Image (cartoon, rainbow, N blue to C red):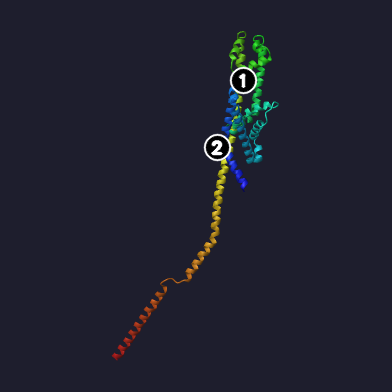
Amino acid sequence: MGLPFQRERLRVFIDSPVFQRAVIAVIALNGLSLGLETSHELADRYATAFLVIDRAILAVFVVEIILRIAVHGKAFFRDPWNWFDLVIVGMALVPASESVSILRLFRFLRVLRLISVVPGMRRVVSALFAALPGLASAVVLLLLSLYTASVIGEQLFHEVAPRYFGDLGRSLFTMFTVLTVEGWPEVAEDVMTKEPLAWIFFATFIVITAFFVLNLLIGVIVSAMEAEVNAQRWKDDQELELQQHIAVMNEIRALNEKVDRLAAQLPALADAAARDRRSCDHQPSHGEAPQAEGGRTEGARTEGAQTKGAQAEADGRRQGE
């Protein structure tokens, strides 16, 4: 009883908004310290302070991971985001030496833990991963359009503008620049000085790629975001309905217990009521005996008066005779 209770209390503490805000604050502090450490002057002047802050933040992350593993157990390793946090914190624990000095750079990745801690950012990244199948088709279509336009541009303008279309590599880079819709007028004007109709090629490529294909990519991402948000809302609704169902079932259970207690008390109450009725039936009511005695007295008086009247009448007859 004690260990599960303590684990439940620890789980509530770890999942509380206060603990989550504290972790976000530590991650933000880590990012700020790493940013300040890029200044060589500050890094040399406050090297000890930066080292202490880095070790303290790493200790906080390690303790957090240990607590989460202790609370969730095997379920901790079923969540990909927990693996993400575990890998980032684990890489920071690798001792820095000359052979693995590159691993020191991975401590800058600890700032990315903000993605796994903030639910909104986590939903965005999850939506991007969910959109990968649809994005793959759209990206292939975009690359195919870029490659086709580069080959056509190299064939048409390699002599007119060798700076931009001298070979396939330059042509690919030029058309990618046109795809971004940044600086493409300079490329088009340079080509159109010798080929006035070159604007048809550039305008067609921009309409197909920048307006259609890129918007298709955005549409796929937006659809994935909507699906992720709807899935999260459905999950929240299911949790809310489950909580309401549990509350209603608890109330029904409490009412059933009260009804059972009342039902258990009914035989005793019925026996007590029956005993009260029997005792009332066997005891005479007050005033009944005096009334009977008064009736007998009154009857005796009436009978004596009638006897006296008959004797007086008989005496009167005898006197008359």
The image quadrant of residue 22 is top right
In front: 315, or 71? 71
Residue lying at 68% horizontally and 15% vertically, measured from the top left = 169
Q: Position of residue 71 (x, y in %)?
A: 63, 41
At numbered mark 2, what does the secondary structure look like: helix, strand or loop?
helix
Is residue 73 in view?
yes
**Which numbered tag is attached to residue 209?**
1
Q: Residues within 10 Å of mark 2 (few under 14, many from 20)?
A: few
Residue pictured at 55% horizontal, 57% vertical = 261
Residue at 56% across, 43% down: 243
Front in this rendered view, residue 23 or 184 = 23
- Total marks shown come to 2
Quadrant that contains the C terminus? bottom left
Amino acid under label 1? Thr
Residue at point 56%, 42% (across, down): 241
Q: Which residue is mark 2?
A: 18
| Image coords of residue 98 (percent x, y) | 69, 26
**SS class of the residue under badge 1?**
helix
